[in-house]
Image (tube, rainbow, N blue to C red):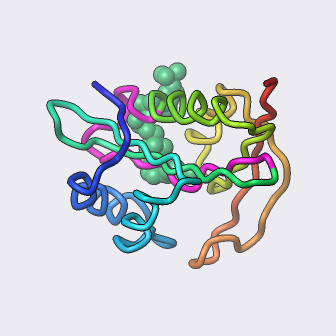
Amino acid sequence: MTVCKTSALDLKALQEIENSSFSSDHISARQMRYHLKNPRAIFLVSKENNKATGYILALTHVQGYARIYSLAVSSDHRGKGYGRMLINSAIKKIEEKNIVKINLEVDQADAKTISLYQSFGFEYVSVLPKYYADGRTAIKMSKVLNG
Ligand SMILES: CC(C)(COP(=O)(O)OP(=O)(O)OC[C@H]1O[C@@H](n2cnc3c(N)ncnc32)[C@H](O)[C@@H]1OP(=O)(O)O)[C@@H](O)C(=O)NCCC(=O)NCCS
């Protein structure tokens, strides 16, 4: 089990994970390619035997905050700690920058993922009705970094 920076060679596998993990609001192959070279992106891939199992994409902003934009683990690798490892690695990378707060949005109905983020210190901020393209409601969560 490893986590490293995403490369162009990982994108095909990550697109498959992305498309099978979300019912709407997919990140396109084009967006993924853009973020490989985006200096404000923290784009990490988890691997097992050199095969991609999941990814996390976080974006940092000049205003001093970051946003976890997406997180997904392939369905046949869930429940093995990849999600936790990806979040942990992204937080460490974000902490190396001049960032005071990390924001994210998560499906209000996804209690498992909400409690996963809570275990990293993310706290409930607000409800975002109809946040997703298919009408689902999100909750906004954030974690303040102590510098
Ligand atoms: C959310 C997601 C990334 C978690 O990845 P994962 O690799 O399965 O997560 P982990 O194995 O690290 O498990 C994290 C926690 O979730 C819980 N969990 C994991 N699998 C579970 C399962 N099958 N049943 C119940 N709880 C489970 C556990 O509480 C675990 O905590 P622990 O480390 O204290 O045991 C993954 O489920 C996923 O890709 N879901 C679809 C996409 C999605 O919803 N992304 C989130 C967008 S905000």
Against 85, is 106 above or below? below
Residue at 41% x, 42% y is: 44
Image quadrant for the N terminus? top left
Image quadrant for the C terminus? top right
Whether the magenta-drawn stretch holds residue 43 is answered as no
Residue at 54% x, 28% y is: 88
Q: Is residue 21 left or right of residue 100?
A: left
Q: Residue furthest right?
A: 126
Locate residue 40: give its quadrant: bottom right
Residue 6 in the image: state x and y as whole percent. Answer: 34, 47
Q: Is residue 9 left or right of residue 89?
A: left
Residue at 50% x, 59% y is: 38
Against 74, is 82 above or below? above
Whether the magenta-drawn stretch holds residue 81 is answered as yes
Residue 70 in the image: state x and y as whole percent. Answer: 52, 54
Towards the viewer: 113 or 46: 46
Q: Number of marks in the image?
A: 0
Q: Is residue 130 left or right of residue 42?
A: right
Towards the viewer: 86 or 24: 86
Residue 30 in the image: state x and y as whole percent. Answer: 38, 74
Residue 78 in the image: state x and y as whole percent. Answer: 35, 37
Locate residue 135: give its quadrant: bottom right
Against 3, is 17 above or below? below
Towards the viewer: 18 or 130: 18
Magenta residues?
64-83
Q: Residue furthest left?
A: 49
Residue at 65% x, 25% y is: 119
Against 137, is 118 above or below? above
